[in-house]
Image (tube, grey):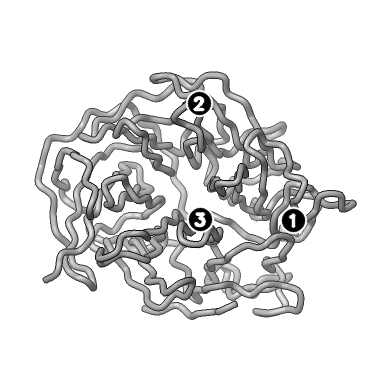
Amino acid sequence: MRTASHKRAPRRLAIAILIALPIAACQSSTNGDAANDTASATAQAAPASQPSQTLPSALGTIRVTEVARGLDHPWSLAFLPDGRMLVTERPGRLRHVAADGAISAPISGVPEVFATGQGGLLDVALAPDFADSQRIYLSYAEPGENGTAGTAVAYGTLAGDALTDVKVVYRQEPKVEGPNHFGSRLVFDGQGHLFVSQGERNQRPLSQELDKLQGKLVRLNLDGSVPQDNPFVGRAGARPEIWSYGHRNMQGMAQDPRTGKLWQNEHGPRGGDEINLPEPGKNYGWPIITHGINYSGQPIPEAVGKAKEGMEQPYHVWEKSPGLSGMAFYTGRPGNPWNDSLFQGSLAERNLIRLTLQGDRIVNEERLLNEIGERVRDVRVGPDDNIYVLTDEDDGKLWRIEPPQAP
């Protein structure tokens, strides 16, 4: 696998155009998985209609429009067939956001979340058969006994402004204490399986312990049962849900539409954010191998260096951490300047990263939205071929980005 170092449309959905309110100046960045604030929020009305703005990019100017604001640390976005969006807020609320930016009251029926530190309501994804079932999946930090918590996944039926028939289909075990490193993204593979990314709950040794689910990428059937071809099925002392292990805190994950390969990103500590293409049964090394150090400036106690036999090297690594978050492929759009790109949010650098792809090779890297200066938590490709991003702030925003126009 290749290791790289950090370097400094045809379909249009009619969406009301809104202008961006005054943009905050860039603030000094903190590590992506270290800064976490939780605040309360109520339903917001749509902002007054205003014109969008243009910003520079390597391939020409891009048009950036503020679709909605007033979201409380939004975490994830999913597009509904009727043109609305579902947005999760980390304190535990799920909302509809209309194409004109109107934000609904919270949708009822969402499971109770552990809304502490990095915990709360995380990813949202439509079931593969959503058109028939109206089912959605949520990942979240689930509270346990005596202040413990763990990543969990539930599904339910979306019925207007309510979530009904909610069922928990996955629980990270054992639950442990601490407010950090829950992950978590959800990806369906198109073959009846659900991948769930997680963190090691800031308890490093757990990533290497196969009888525990922290620091593991897990693969499930859609009902939460275990596929019998998972790599550790039948192995004594190993959880059968595990697909790969040795991960730190996976906050972005997507399937390449061109190849079907699963890609995921994860936070390093101080340095060493990475992309992996996780394969069944493989060990991705945390905390034994890493390109990062502790936030204190001292080495990771368990680390033996950047490589060890039997452990996978990162597919792509940043020696200086951007604080990676959501991930989205932009493919299948010949003639579009952004065709064959991989977008990733950056929490620490407060921007959007665009990686240019040639097949699986990453050949170039660009930073967008530096002028906005907000923590980018999620990125998605809309049905209108535009890019949508959520910013992880007290006054979180949903932005629409149109591909570049030639200078």
Which kind of residue does numbered mark 1 sit on? Answer: Leu
Does the CB distance between marks 1 and 2 fall below 8 Å? no
Residue that appears at 76% across and 79% down: 309
Residue that appears at 44% across and 40% down: 38
Mark 1 vs mark 2, CA separation in Å? 37 Å
Work out which quarter of the rendered image holds the N terminus and state it: bottom right
Mark identifier at residue 206: 1
In the picture of the structure, the residue carrying the numbered disc 3 is 255
SS of the residue at dot 1? helix
Residue that appears at 77% across and 56% down: 231
Count of picture labels: 3
Residue that appears at 46% across and 61% down: 258
Q: Position of residue 334 (x, y in %)?
A: 29, 64
SS of the residue at dot 3? strand
Where is 361 relative to 18, above or below?
A: below
Which kind of residue does numbered mark 3 sit on? Answer: Gln
In the visual, does 350 lie left or right of 223?
left
Category of crowding for the residue at label 1, using alpha-carbon neighbours closer than 10 angstroms: few (below 14), some (14–19), many (at least 20) = many
In the picture of the structure, the residue carrying the numbered disc 2 is 133
Q: Quadrant of residue 142?
A: top right
Which kind of residue does numbered mark 2 sit on? Answer: Ser
Q: Nearer the viewer, mark 3 or mark 1?
A: 3
Q: Position of residue 91 (x, y in %)?
A: 46, 35
Sequence-first disc among 3 and 1: 1
